Image (cartoon, helix red, strand yellow):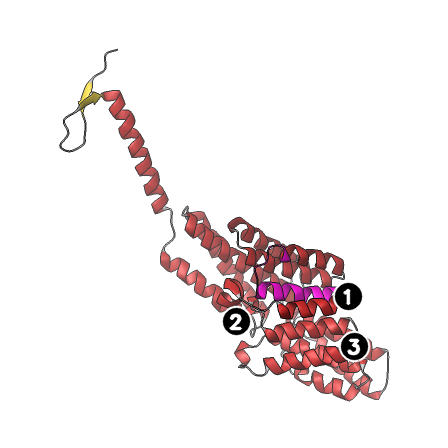
Amino acid sequence: MELGFATDYTPGVKTSVPATERELIMSAASESSDHAAEIEAAAVGPNALEQLGDDIIRLARAYVHAPPLPLFGELTRVRNRTYRLLERTRNPGQQHELYLAAGQLCGLLGSASFDLGYPYAAAEQARAARVYGEVIGHNELSAWADGLLACVEFWAGRPAQALRLVERGLAIAPAGTTRVRLLSIAARASALLGDSDGTRNAILAARDSRGPQGELHEGVGGEFGFDEAREAFCAGSAYLSARMAQEAETECERALSLYRAVPVEQRWYAAEASACVDLAAARLLSGAIDRAADALSPVFALKPDKRVEGLLKRMVQVRTSLASAPCRETSALAERIDDFSTETATRGLPASF
């Protein structure tokens, strides 16, 4: 079949080319253009991304002073919006930003799930956060998620598994706050294993690791933050588990001093209250019952919707310690703990939660 000829479309050029050749070239150009237009159209507007970033910072920072249950619904709503935005965009830069947002929101949902007494759900959310971190190569997020998983494990009575998760996190953790947090968690797990040397070494290593705070710990902050007060609180808790009463009391008092030196809205209320409970437990180890009761006074004033799972577990431990040395003072304190534990953050949950 004989080829026809057509004039090239290029302005100012009068070259004739075979029609089939021209069609091939112009078709390829059209396909490229169409695909580029499709990609350009399948993007998320800058306002949506800006709003999402603002929402995450607001919720992460609200987490330290607000009850977890009201936040849970909003965290879920914002996470679902993030998923919808991911379905709309094919822009790699936007996908990276949205996977990071999804990971942060799943991390916050993991913390809230644990505080509301659902450790299995907390672990699922933490694993999702770790996956999103891996997808975009965000080691700080993945290492943070390993820390949350380790916390779930040692509270479930599996400190050896908690240490393995800490080691996995440390293998990818950037320098600075991410490592401080993981080493602080390692100290608590080591204490539960009865390793007092490992406990002390992890606490000292955490102090030596202070440095850059990173995008997640400082840029977002709030529940993702891990300041010196939180580090001291974890150290006190670890020393308490290792039955090192004097060291535990010193660190708990340091944590409380640091917390009370900043405005209320910047304090992590659950850690501050838990440090009070650990301080009371440390004083009970030393036989100072009256001073233990004084340490618990701020905790008894905490509203029920802020009585989260970790705090209640600590109160149960103190209640158990009181039972081993019954007297008028311990009986009265035990009764107050029982009353305190009847109204908690989880009581507001719907039956199908």
- Extreme top residue here? 1
- Asked if residue 234 lies left or right of residue 141, the reply is right
110 sits left or right of 15 in the view: right
> Residue 107: x percent and y percent?
57, 60
Kindly identify which residue carries mark 2.
62
Q: What is the magenta segment's predominant secondary structure?
A: helix
Where residue 213 appears, as percent x and y from the top left, is: 53, 66
Residue 242 sits in which quadrant?
Answer: bottom right
Magenta segment range? Answer: 170-190
Q: Badge 1 is on which residue? A: 192
Q: Neighbour class for label 3 at 10 Å: few (<14), some, many (≥20)?
A: many
Q: Give the SS element for disc 3.
A: helix
Q: Quadrant of residue 195?
A: bottom right
Give residue 346's position: percent from left, percent from top. 65, 68
Residue nearest the observer in this picture, 120 or 228: 228
- Residue 203, picture quadrant: bottom right
Q: CA distance from mark 2 to mark 3?
A: 31 Å
Residue occupied by mark 3 = 319
Q: Earlier in the sequence, mark 1 or mark 3?
A: 1
Callout in the foreground (1, 2)? 1
173 drawn magenta: yes
In this view, 213 is above or below 142: below
